[in-house]
Image (tube, rainbow, N blue to C red):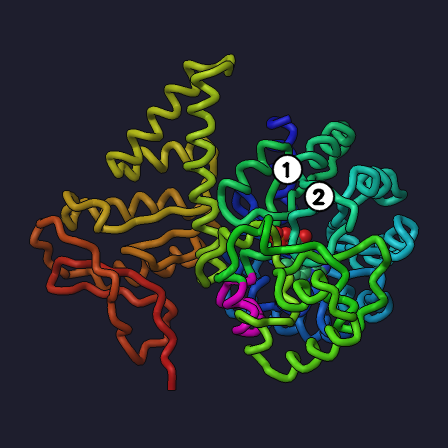
Amino acid sequence: MASRVRNQLQALKKVYPWISTPLIISAPMRVFAGPALAVAVTKAGGIGFIGPGASPPDLDIALTESRRLLEQSSASSHSSMQPVGIGLQTFDADLGIAIQAIREHKPYAVWLFAPRDGQSELNTWVQSVKDSSPETQIWIQVGSVMDALSAARAPIPPDVLVIQGSDAGGHGLARGAGFISILPEVADELRDTNILLMAAGGIADGRGVAAALSLGAAGAVMGTRFLASEEAKIPRGYQEDVLKTSDGSQNTIRTKLYDELAGRTDWPSMYDGRNIRNRSTQDQESGLSFAENEKLYKKALTKGNDGWGENGRLTAYVGAGVGLVREVTAACTIVTTTTTSIITTTLDASKMASKTAHPDKKEIEDRTEKLRLAYNKRDIDGALAMFVDEGLNCSAYSISRKSYPNMNKARFEEFLLTMHSKLKHYRHNTISVSGHKEFQAWEWEMVWEEYKKVGQGDSSDGQGVDGQEDSSDAGGATSDIAVETVAGEDIAVEPRKRRRN
Ligand SMILES: Cc1cc2nc3c(=O)[nH]c(=O)nc-3n(C[C@H](O)[C@H](O)[C@H](O)COP(=O)(O)O)c2cc1C
C-alpha cells in the first residue's frame, strides 16, 4: 500500500508542482475559507481550497482575489492555472455561474460535495468542469464506501476522493462512520485505480495526519483546525468558541437543528452537520418547542459576537477534534507545525513497529537512531541528509541560533549556505530562521541575497550567541525580507513586518 501511495504522490507532485509532503489540505469551508486562507495554505506547500460563498457570483470575486494574492508571490509562477482549489456543494450551486468562473480562472482543482441526486448529478458537474477547463482536477468528497465506489465507476472518475468521516465539522452524511473504518475499505476496493484518497474528519494535528497516512491516504484535509487561523473569515465569537471547546465527544453534536433554525430546509435529507452543543441544542433536548427555540435563535442573531459564547445559541460548525485546537496562528504555521510533528509521530510509530514485528527491523532501527542522533546533535547536515537526500522531502525546516548554542558565526553562515544549496531544489518547503519566523523556500533565494548584502564586511567575534527573535524592521525598504546584524554577532533573518500607517 505504501509504495502505491508513494507512486501516486510522485504523480501528484507533477500535477501540483508546489506541494510538499506530507500533504495538508485546507477544506473548502463555506464562507469561512476565503482566498486569503487558500493562498496561505498553498504557499506553505499544501493545497488550499476556497469554500462556497454566500451566493454563486461570490466565486468569481474570490478567484479574482486569489489571483491577485498569488501574483504578489512567486507561488503564481507555475502555469496559467491558479494553484488553489474551489469547493462547490452541487445541490445549491449554480452550474452555469460556476463553470464560467472555472473557465476564466482555471483553479487547479474543483471539489464537489453534497449532490441532491447522487452520482448522476455529480457526473453532470464533472463533465462540465472538464469541458471548461480540462486540466482542472476533480475532487469529490464522500462519506461512505458506497458513494466512493459509485464515483470511482463513473464515466469520468475523480482524480481524488476525499473520504469524510463522521467526526468531520460542518455537513456530512447523517449515517456515517469515522474515516478510520471507511478509508482502508475504500483503499482496498480501489487498489487497481489511480484515484488518490484523502482523509477528512477530526484531524487537527500531526498525529491525526500520521494516522490517515497509515490507513492509505495520500494527504489529510483539515477544516476545523483552519477555523483557528489568522486568515479564516470567521466571526470572533465563533472563533473563541472553537478555542474554548474541548472533548468533542461530549461538546459537539451531529444535528439538523441549526439548518432548521437558520431556515436552510434545502439540504438533501441524508445530510446533517456537526456543531458545538450550545443553548439551542440543550433547549431542544429539554423539550422547548421549535417555535420558541427559533425565536431565541433569531434574537441571538442580533447580538453579533455575543450570539456565541457561554450562553450562545448560534451555529458553530466544528469537528470532533476541536479540543486539539488551542490557538489562532497563521495558516502557514499550522501547515508547518503539523508536518513537523508528523515526522516525530511517525518516528515514534516506526520505533514501536521496529520493536515488534517489522521484517526490516534492523534497517528501521538504524534509520531511527540516525535521525534521533541528528535531532539530538542539532546537526542540520545530518537532518538534511535524512530529509532531503533520502527523499523524505520534509516540508518544514527550522534554523535557530538558540538551538545551536555552540555554533559560532562562521559555522552559522556555513549552515545557511548548506540550507541554501540544498533547498533551492525544494522551493516549496518552509524554513524558519532564528526562532519563530518562517519563510517559504521560494523566498529563500531572497533571504540569502539579503543576508549576503547585509552580512558582507561584517566582522565576527567567533563566539556562540543566542538567536535574536525580535530583529526590528529596517524601515523604508520595500523588500519583503529584513536581515539585520547586531553588534557584529547576532544574526536575525525574518520576514519584514508590514508597516502600518
Ligand atoms: C465551518 C465548516 C464549513 C464547511 N463547509 C463545507 C463546504 O462548504 N463544502 C464542503 O465540501 N465541506 C465543508 N465542510 C466540511 C469539510 O470539507 C471537511 O470535511 C471537514 O472540515 C473535515 O473535518 P474537520 O473539520 O474535523 O477537520 C465544512 C466544515 C466546516 C468545519
Q: Which amino acid type is shown beneath numbered disc 1? A: Ala
Q: Earlier in the sequence, mark 2 or mark 1?
A: 2
Quadrant including the N terminus = top right
Specify the quarter for ligand 1: bottom right
Q: Camera-side residue: 158 or 449?
A: 158
Nearest to the observer: residue 352 or residue 94: 352
- Whether pointer 2 and pointer 1 mark residues with C-beta atoms closer than 8 Å, the reply is yes
Asked whether mark 2 and ligand 1 are closer than 8 Å, the reply comes as no
Give the quadrant of the C terminus: bottom left
Viewer-closest of 204 and 287: 287
Residue 432 magenta: no
Percent position (x, y) of residue 60?
A: 72, 73
Check residue 163 in the rendering and tell me which mark sits there, or answer none: 2
| Secondary-structure class at tag 2 | strand
Q: Secondary structure at mark 1?
A: loop
The residue wearing badge 1 is 217
